[in-house]
Amino acid sequence: MRDAHHGLAAHEVVLLLETDADRGLGTDEAARRLQRFGPNMLPAATGGGLLWRVLRQFHHPLIYVLIAAGAITAALGEYVDSAVILGVVLVNALVGSVQESKAEAALESLRSMVRTTARVVRGGREQAVPSEDLVPGDLVLVEAGDKVPADVRLVRVAELRVDESALTGESAPVAKDEVVLDAGTAVADRRNMVHSGTLVAAGRGTGIAVATGAQTELGEIHRLVGAAETLATPLTAKLAAFSKVLTVVILALAAVTFAIGLVRGQGAVQTFTAAVALAVGAIPEGLPAAVTITLAIGVGRMAGRRAVIRRLPAVETLGSTTVICSDKTGTLTENQMTVHTVWTPEATFTVTGSGYAPEGAVQSRQGTEAATEANRALWWCLLAGAGCNDAVLTDEDGRWGLVGDPTEGAMLVVAGKGGLAANEVGERYPRIDTIPFSSERQYMATLHRDSTAGDHVVLAKGAVERVAALCRAQITADGGVVALDRAVVLRAAEDLAAQGLRVLATAVGPSADPDRFGEEELSGSLVLTGLQAMLDPPRPAAAAAVGACHTAGITVKMITGDHAATASAVAARLGLLAEPGEDGQRRLLTGADLAVLPAHAYPDAVERARVFARVSPEQKLRLVEAMQGRGQVVAMTGDGVNDAPALRRANIGIAMGRGGTEVAKDASDMVLTDDDFATIEAAVEEGRGVFDNLTKFIVWTLPTNMGEGLVILLAILLGSTLPVLPTQILWINMTTAVALGLMLAFEPKEAGIMQRPPRDPARPLLTGALVTRILLVSALLVAGSWWLFEWERRMGASLAEARTAAVNLFVAVELLYLFSCRSLTRSVWRIGLLSNRWVVGGVLAQAVGQLALTYVPAMNHLFHTAPITGQAWLRILGIAALTALAVALDKHLRHRPL
């Protein structure tokens, strides 16, 4: 357990760490501590390199079955067959490892530059050292713009405010001081500490480094990430279970086949060969490759919609997602404080636009743009906010950012929207003196010289109660001054705060003597100009995306470390909270609420709630686990360090690429390159399309493989000649899987894909309907191929010719069945016979292959086939058409997906 340094007085921390609050550590002592504690770095992740990435692709039950089949065929001397099977396994591994490498390369390109030095005092001298050389006991200096390099107990501060949103989720910078706190104070409320990875928004601070590397709060989150279990995806879990069942069934059938052959007096080698043929026929060799390639195609489609997939199976997980747990700050919101409303004593104005970009306007309640110059109350309110301000807006390649406090940034932006550019304010009203903001004072005041009039003016902003206490009057729209109506001002502030807005008051006043500028002189001398109400606004497309998720049957929950009032306001704007009367008080839970919930009530409370505020990283992790315990497939989105453990534990973790921390990206399965929640909706749509196409391939391949195995079993049971040989079965399986089955990966998304509920996670891979379809198609294949084989033999065809007819029948049935599988519910005529050109191309390629297999002498020799007559082709096509008709009738009567 890490020491509670926030609960100790500053001098006690100095004694405990054997350092000096003025001179810091000596250089030699710092070197010794570096050797003792190690570098100030988080433990590096061990990825295992290229070899491990390739080997990881073989870790799948179905791959084990294929490897075993390849080994058995090689042991029997069937080296061509063995090479084909093992070649499929190798291709699958290469495709998967190459895709993972591409994803890592794409993620690497998103990594941002980080500060690599820290300012410390060692031996009484201030110096810059690499952040990794920082040690416990170092005297650390931080100022506006710095990234905090370690966990630091503050000993001296000067108006220090720190942006801790990446660690705690709180959107507003936190004012810091050096007072002693209770040892049990939560991380988000430790105002005498600054933590590794957070950003200094304003002011300066000096403190003792109390934890570095893995011992910091950031390191604790890193440990939680490493301990969080990475779950199997819904489809891969079902395929793993299915593979085990398939292995048992195939081995049982092979054993029965071998035993029956021996009982009937057939040779052991011949019977064993037939049993292997049954196994090879029943194993869907193309399934692993089809799954990998279909997922890779989905990755490409998602990349085009600004979503980088880091782990391949995450594609189909998106299609099964039932709950999206989203962080608020920077994910559902802009993470850029924005003034929403400006109140003046005689009017209220609405501000359009969001973020730090100077786009938008200040509008009257009638929706018309306000004439700032004409309304002197509005003009002075905006001027006070922009002039009494230390923030600086930045523009880097069209991306607007901020150096300084987000609240002050919002005031600069709204002034610009009202026609008061920051540089113009500074030129006309240059600053002379400042009374800085402090947590005790709760306001900031600045003294300016009016370069036009030649006199001086005071501008002030801060907490409404404190600024109102400094005012004797309030301004009118024409610039006049009337007595301050304190009750009206406070009531207006309360109304705005009830909407979840952060409210600041602004004031102005003349300065008769610029040499006398202090707190005593300000009291009772100012004129209230108005109120500015702001919030971190929802992203423009977030509300629509949340609505689309609801339409798709996906529950969206907000999980944030921010305050309940702020979270509630954003949630209401996004449509996350229930309407009044719908158990609304249970729709928002705080971390404190969760901490006292009894274990038996926890899952139900989590299920009902839509917003979780002021929660810790550990609580986020437990929330995800609670939902998964209810059978939900959980997607977790976030951008902060505090999101990383839950991102890792979720079925799919989604990080923000532009504004997200590296810790969050490394813990995620998917990274959004545009940081937009709306992109998740697009990714879910693509994921559902991928899941549909994988299901279509499974529905297509399982009946045909089962039919091949049953044909072999029937031949053994009847003591008859095999209608198809093992090499011919391999030809069927591999060519149809590539030329026909894989074409389903390119199937366009079906209409209404986002108007249906997500697939039930408890729904088995082999549903009753699918088992019925497998039995139907398998029975038709067995009956048709057996009848055709026997008919050809009775009509005088050679054994090779009869087997060639049977092989072509299998392929013809699979070809027509492919068109049925292009949609699980609708007929091929409704979706368009030629709407997937890849299928058309695959059918033509397969047809050419079958003609080559039948009529090219080299192929005849290699696969033991022979040319067949036109009448045989007519019989093949007739049986295939009857099979397709039976399947179409089954689909029509069923009226629901498999």
Image (cartoon, rainbow, N blue to C red):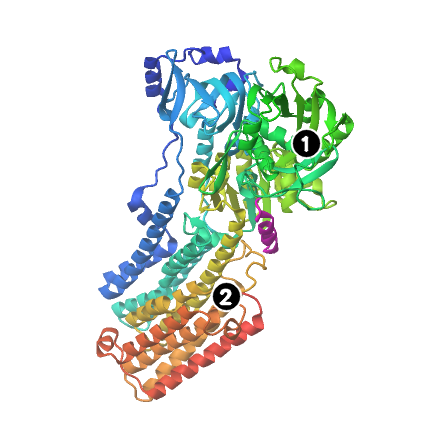
What secondary structure is the stretch in magenta mostly built from?
helix
> Above or below — where is 243 with respect to 505?
below
The answer to if 763 sits in the magenta stretch is no
Instruction: Report the residue at 38% width, 22% height from top.
Output: 134
How far apart, in angstroms, are the residues tagged by discs 1 and 2? 64 Å
| Image coords of residue 140 (percent x, y) | 43, 19
Rendered position, 603 above or below 63? above
Q: Secondary structure at mark 1?
A: strand
Whether residue 476 sits left or right of residue 257 in the image: it is: right
Q: Nearer the viewer, residue 574 or 882?
A: 574
Q: Is residue 172 visible?
A: no
* Residue 664 image point, x, y percent: 46, 39
Q: Name the amino acid type tagged 1.
A: Leu
Residue occupying the point 35% across, 17% down: 33
Q: Range of the magenta residues?
A: 539-553
Please give the residue where the numbered disc 2 appears in the rendered image.
770
Answer few, some or many: residues within 10 Å of disc 2's Cα (few below 14, many 20 plus, some between 14 and 19). some
Q: Amino acid at mark 2?
A: Leu
Residue 86 is marked as none
- Look at mark 1 in the image and give the residue it sits on: 531
